[in-house]
Amino acid sequence: MSEQVTNILLVGVGGQGILLASEILSETFMLAGFDVKKSEIHGMSQRGGSVVSHVRYGREVFSPIVPEGEGDILFGFELMETYRCLPLLKPGATVIANDLRIPPASVLMGKERYPEGLAELITARFPDFLLVDGQKLAARAGNQRAANTVLLGAVSKRLDVAEEYWLQALEAMVPRKALDVNRKAFLLGREL
Amino acid sequence: MKEILSGNEAVARGAYESGVLVATAYPGTPSTEILENIIRYKEINASWSPNEKVALEVAMGASFAGARSLVAMKHVGVNVAADPLFTLSYTGIKGGLVLVTADDPEMHSSQNEQDNRNYARFAKVPMLEPGDSRECKEFTRLALELSERYDTPVMLRTTTRISHGKSIVDLEERVSSLPTPALVKNAAKQVMLPSNARVRHPLVEERMKRLSEAADTMAVNRMELRDTGVGIITSGVCYQYVREVMPHVSTLKLGLVNPLPAGLIRRFAARVERLFVVEELDPFIEEQVKAMGIAVSGKDFIPVCGELTPGRLRQAFQGQDVGLDEAPVLPAEPEDVSLPGRPPNMCPGCPHRGVFYTLNRLKAYVTGDIGCYTLGFLPPLSSMETCVCMGASIGNATGTVKVVSEEEKKKVVAVIGDSTFLHSGITGLMDMVYNNAHSTVVILDNRITAMTGRQDNPASGFTLMDEPAHRTDLALLCKAVGVKHVRVVNPFDLEETRRALQEEMERPETSVIITDKPCVLVKREGVFKRGPLYTVEVEKCTGCKACLGLGCPAIQWRSTDGGKGVSFIDPTLCTGCDVCRQLCKFDAIGRAK
Ligand SMILES: Cc1ncc(C[n+]2csc(CCOP(=O)(O)OP(=O)(O)O)c2C)c(N)n1
Ligand code: SF4
Ligand code: SF4
């Protein structure tokens, strides 16, 4: 095992902006001088399926995907998908998730139920679990749609990479007109 | 300059830096982004071809005139391009030619997981296999150089994890001193009549022999000695997994996987006590090493099916006593919460939806094809009986109506997308008419190749470079092959669609129905137009669930206190296609005020 490698998983539903968030993470790590690898599956997942993105950084990274059971941080954009991904984490991992439920087709059609009590179940297995009302905080920063950036801020707080690299990466990856709101959202997240 | 690039972006960059002038492809996951990124480099003439065979033939023509060229496809695309490929191996090239095959172990978005390393051996062409984005760029360049040095096309094989994985790449300048392309006559080398081909074949054998010798000293084949108790021969992304899971073992990393470096493999085998091969899918390397008389194992305990992952590799090696760290203690599996799955679905407002709804109601037997519309197989639409390869729907229908009763014949409908029809459906249709098979073909013309992420095609009216182009007239094309009954319908009008299908299915002749509404993801001005929003009037909704039969993601079910429940339309998702309104017998669905 390459000891110094940090393993981050981003999960959610196609179209939620997971790819952009994982790009910002990787860009930050590169700017901070680390080796970085990132992997995800495009394709069918874009039609509303689950999406998992893997980001790994450290002195030297080999596998582009996080070895099963070695995830350090799970960054969840949707609650059920967050729960689904728990088996990839190592004991004691950090889970940061947006308090958002997107019902899948079977639930929308009334055939199945969206499971209840997921947050409690996650806390029971991973005490270091932070559930964030991303939409609300993002609204405070000026736009509900910056919820991912609030969460990104919360994630950044748990990684030892200087704030300047995060801000540089945001600047490089976020469209200019949305930059101000995103910077605010990011900093709000860092306070969590 | 350093950048984080995906494998596909790095191949595109490699093509640019190596002076490639022509790049062609037919889209296919996970290869599609190569051409989508190549258009950033204005020096390269890049285009979508109607299929992979044409793509290779175009690249070949450019190469014969002396230009460096690249052609990209997904693994099954090589099946389509195999005919020119096998003989191109004989003619050789003039300007370097690299064929990128993007394989998809695990079938993340494919219909099979064939191992295209076998093609390199079968067609007798060299194959390189990069293990990260940096190598994607470097190997693209090396492929073009080897191509010219050995007068052969060169295959570059990636897998999904390499194509879509990102890592850091150093960017360099484009080479500048390549010869200018021009017509060069060299008929004896390029006209593969038997007499000429007989001259070429021995040269192919001799070339592969030379390459095999050179392989022993190529820098991309790298022996890394660590603990010599265990030695592992590996390549591509598998090398990364080996380093991850067994950092202490010695490795022989192969960059060139065809031909294999026999001398180097022997030397490595002699240096280590126990020898293994770690490779995804077929025992391609392992069998050849065994044939060299070397004791080696691998596929007796490493799975043949699916992709490898660090976890799967660790698990496979558990019983092999190779000094693995303890497997990490996995957290307990999720408690007994049943998590609903999240299968993909057609978008809200997808023009395919109403067609499948109607086919379902008409109890049609649908021979299907590959595209977004393959999702018509899933409930609640559930109306597809076959889907094998691109273009197969029409031939399948022809074969089926040859043998079933007159009554059953009427149920057979082939359904195919515009891009797929142009790729390989037109020949099937010609056969259907020529051999007098009475079936109905539905061409779902959504003005784009949607499944792979919205690529243009000859019927979309634009090129890869976003220039306006002649738009193939599908109706005229069908008439030209002899279909007498061609009608164009609006798939958002369920009554019109039903009538057309019913009449054509009854008709004892070949007929074609073309649906004519764009994919909701087409961004081009004036093609897709969002309609007015629709809502459900709660007072009128009886909870009959008729609208749910469409499976539109915008239509949701809400339980009501005491009542049966009602439908609800999510205003952020509805595109206003109007289809659900037509299904409601109680007039509960209408335009939002
Ligand atoms: C030989 C081959 N090449 C490429 C692909 C990838 N692929 C699958 S479906 C498809 C095209 C779908 O376009 P279309 O027929 O227009 O249907 P749509 O997705 O737009 O509904 C492609 C390129 C494949 N499966 N097989
Ligand atoms: S991408 Fe286009 S063709 Fe595919 S499901 Fe969505 S609307 Fe339909
Ligand atoms: S009009 Fe009805 S079927 Fe069409 S997108 Fe809106 S909710 Fe879906």
Image (cartoon, coloured by chain):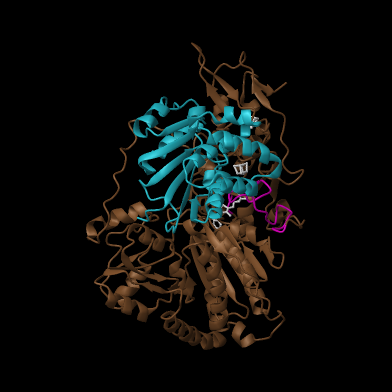
Chain colours: A cyan, B brown
Residue B502, given in percent of the width and then of the height, sits at 62, 38
Relative to B345, B464 lies left or right: right
Please say whether residue B509 is visible from this viewpoint. Answer: no
Residue sitting nearer the eye, A16 or A167: A167
Image quarter of residue B588: top right
Above or below for B360 versus B4:
above
Above or below for B497 versus B287:
above
Image quarter of residue B55: bottom right
Circle count: 0
Please say whether residue B258 is visible from this viewpoint. Answer: yes
- Residue occupying the far top of the picture: B562
Residue at point 65%, 23% (across, down) = B535
Residue B100, given in percent of the width and then of the height, sits at 54, 66
Residue sitting nearer the eye, B122 or A98: A98
Quadrant of the drawing holding the C terminus of chain B: top right
B442 in magenta: yes
Relative to B242, B324 lies left or right: left
Residue sitting nearer the eye, A133 or B507: A133
Give the magenta part as a residue range.
Answer: B437-465
Image quarter of residue B217: bottom left
The secondary structure that most of the magenta stretch takes on is: loop
Residue B530, given in percent of the width and then of the height, sits at 71, 35
Residue at point 40%, 61% (across, down) = B238
B425 in magenta: no
Residue at point 48%, 25% (across, down) = A110
Residue sitting nearer the eye, B454 or B179: B179
Relative to B327, B362 lies left or right: right
